[in-house]
Image (cartoon, coloured by chain):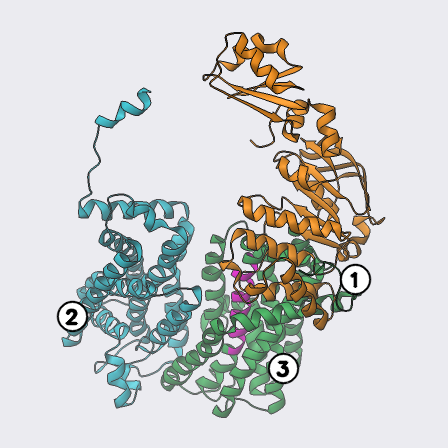
Chain colours: A green, B orange, C cyan
Amino acid sequence: MTDYADSGPATPPTAPAGLVSGALRMGDYWLTVLARTWKGGVITTFVTPFFYVLALGVLLGGFVEADPATLEGADSYLAFVAPGMVAAHAMTIAFSEMTYPVYGMVKWQRIYFSMIASPLTASHIVLAQLGFLMLRTLFACGVFLLVLAPFGVFGTWWGLLMAWLVQGLVVLAFGTPVLLFSLSIKGEESFALIFRLGMIPLTLFSGTFFPVANLGPVLEKVAMASPLWQGVNLTRMLALGEIDWALAAVHVGYLGLLAGVCWWLAVRKLDERLVS
Amino acid sequence: MISARGLRKSFGDFEAVRGIDVSVRPGVAFGFLGPNGAGKSSTMRMICCVSPPSGGELRVFGMDPAKDGPKIKARLGVCPQEDTLDVELNVYDNLFVYGRYFGLPRAEVKGRIEELLDFVQLTDKAKAKVDDLSGGMKRRLTIARSLINRPEILVLDEPTTGLDPQARHVIWDRLFRLKQAGVTLLLTTHYMDEAEQLCDELVVMDQGRIVAHGTPLGLIQQHSTREVAELRFGVGEHEALAAKVEDLAERVEVLPDRLLLYSDDGEAVIEAVHSRDLSPVATLVRRSSLEDVFLHLTGRTLVD
Amino acid sequence: MALFTAAVSATVARPLRGGEAARLLLWRNILVYRRAWLVFITGFLEPVFYLFSIGIGVGAMVVGFEYAGKPVDYREFVAPGMIAASAMNGSLLDATFNFFFKLKYNKLYDQMLATPLRTVDIAVGEILWNQLRSGIYVTAFLLIMVAMDLVHSWWALLVVPAALLIGSAFGAVGMALTTYMTSWQDFEKVTLAMMPMFLFSATFFPVTAYPEWLRWIVEVTPLYRGVVLCRELTLGVPSWGSLVSVVYLLAFGAVGLVVVRRRLDSLLLT
């Protein structure tokens, strides 16, 4: 039976020096969680998007006329669909990671409460969580892009690289509002609604599978306002190598603003829920 | 170490803590005793810097929780009422990630984990999933976790609620050793036996206020007699019979299922009751406890 | 004391008959959903979204499409695929996630078996509820198809019972598989099965897009049979393919039901 306070060096525990150093203290938490749960998400993370590309991009694509005029500059339906699917995949990861897991950390297992009992604050917690989300997404989308590359759907290597990096922004643009949502709701029934009325229509109508021009003049404008269209169009431009820099700037600005505002609100909401 | 003056906490219209004054010296085991809803947990949460006070003054380690929350938390250990353990991780992982939140280097955290698991006797469960542990083991794990940063004050909110008697004794033993090692303990409870056994000093809380303060023995001596005679009659008869036995004791309390007669000599009271041709169904003589103190001060029992 | 003695002789509880028990379970599910009506209504939307997105949005770019030797509008081709797919999806989700939750965490069925209900009543009751809901969704979808002028034959009316058959079959098999699962991680396998079926069972493109050797493998998968059945009915060209599908689905469901009953017996009554 050892006594309470002896054996080994004793570093005095301290409050974190800054935002990043505090967030880094959570690194081991996220790495450990990943190590214990990665097997459960392998299929949806890696296999699903690939199947979609195969079924719709390749097999259905065989029936779609390969006219760059109707396909926004892409040589084939596959080249049109692939970048859209990458952005949609980033969005899907944001939704799946920021809904039930976050709710569980607030309501069921109350993990956030264990974090706040330490010197960490809501800002550290959110930074660490979103940082981890970004890393995961970049990894998953990176694998996806590498698998697609041999099919000859990308214009330039640097366009491909930028298309990849942009997914970090896309996932934050969706991750932060969904995080805010999950921290604010009272019951998990609401999740079914944002999946059915949010994620699914966004996936289907934001220029992922067909150009938004096919929706008609009015609905086209509506679709363009969606954050996923901004992400899809940006990714597609970079992947195909046909970049309208002014429009790209608009896309980046839109996504960045959305991510920034929701991030700030999410930190405040988490603080409100943990400290009352 | 901790000092509060006129401390208040409200949730909207509801006042959970209505102005309390508390002072905790280093090295003591300090208890907050009271029924559910007395304001004990709210007070603990304010001390742990996870709930901003609505009024009054609070200082922990001489610092203000509103300004120096993280610095204070670095030196506190918290064992909350509801286990906030991560069921996706095993026992070892739970301790590891928590230790890292305090900025401790990895090697050091690993060293402490072994030490702590030994202290709470969970060494053979290091790789077990949290879900597979019993309630008592989970609570021991939570205590081990709260010690990972070698805190100067350990705050425990209802540490043995819901546990079987054996588990409770194991935990009391561990807390006692911690006290001997010089850790200041701050605990809330609604179990009088826990308060009597563990605490050097305690306050009794009811409805947001402190109604008594002192050592367990001192409180009993001050607010109650040395012994209590319990009499049980038939259902519904206690109220009426109270008048008949009033003069036999210093004080009589009427409960729904018994009469309590407070006196320094319980046996004598029982004899006198029998000599008056009253036949209680059952009698019992026991020493006064903190439950009696609470009953006297508030007219209610600790456990509803 | 009258509290305890009076009521005993008034009515005597008796074991429920089969139909009654299933109806009770159905009623319980309806009660639960009455409060979550918004969730109920939105459940219908997914196949509609796919119809508009892939059927019309992508359909605008698909040229020269043929089915069974005749040229056909792409949207008319996709719509029945969506009916079959949503019948499968709806049933499987209930038969897996919800069923697992009720079995493991809610202890709902333990509760029910303490009463005169039997395990087969539970299985049938759950399936009935799924199909009632599915039937409502399919009928609504069919009405949309009619409104969009995608239906030209009276055979299409049979697509409603066809969808119910598909749903019941998948529901029974889904529940059977769920009884073998032990943790939420196992559900990845459900997705692993469902998602390729959804994409590759000639829902979005004809089975002729596959090379010969792959084609017959697809033809023996359950969702493909469901898609063929629905498509032949809505397009008005029923053939042996439909008959084979009906027999296949009936057998598929029957096997599932037998397994569910055995498994529930061993899980809940030991």
Asked if the residues shown at circle 2 and circle 3 are in contact, with their CB atoms under 8 angstroms apart, the answer is no
Is residue A90 covered in magenta?
yes
- Front one among C143 and C18: C18
Is disc 3 in the same subunit as disc 1? yes
Label placed on residue A244? 3
Q: For residue B206, what is the image quadrant?
A: top right
Write down the region rendered in magenta.
Answer: A86-103
Depth check, mark 3 against mark 1: the one in front is: 1
Mark 3 / mark 1, whichever is N-terminal: 1
Q: Secondary structure at mark 3?
A: loop
The residue to which callout 2 is attached is C247
* Amino acid type of the residue that numbered disc 1 sits on in the rendered structure: Thr
Contact (Cβ within 8 Å) of mark 1 with mark 2: no
**Toward which corner of the image does residue A234 lie, by quadrant?**
bottom right
Report which residue position mark 1 lands on.
A14
Single out the mark in the foreground, 2 or 3.
Answer: 2
User: Which residue is rendered at x = 61% and y = 35% of the image?
Assistant: B36
Residue drawn at 61 percent across, 84 percent down: A243
Tell me if residue B264 comes above or below residue B30 in the rendering.
above
What chain does mark 3 sit on? Answer: A
Q: CA distance from mark 1 to mark 2?
A: 70 Å
Please state the horizontal and vertical placement of residue B226, each as a whole percent of the image: 68, 24
Q: Are marks 3 and 1 in contact (CB under 8 Å)?
A: no
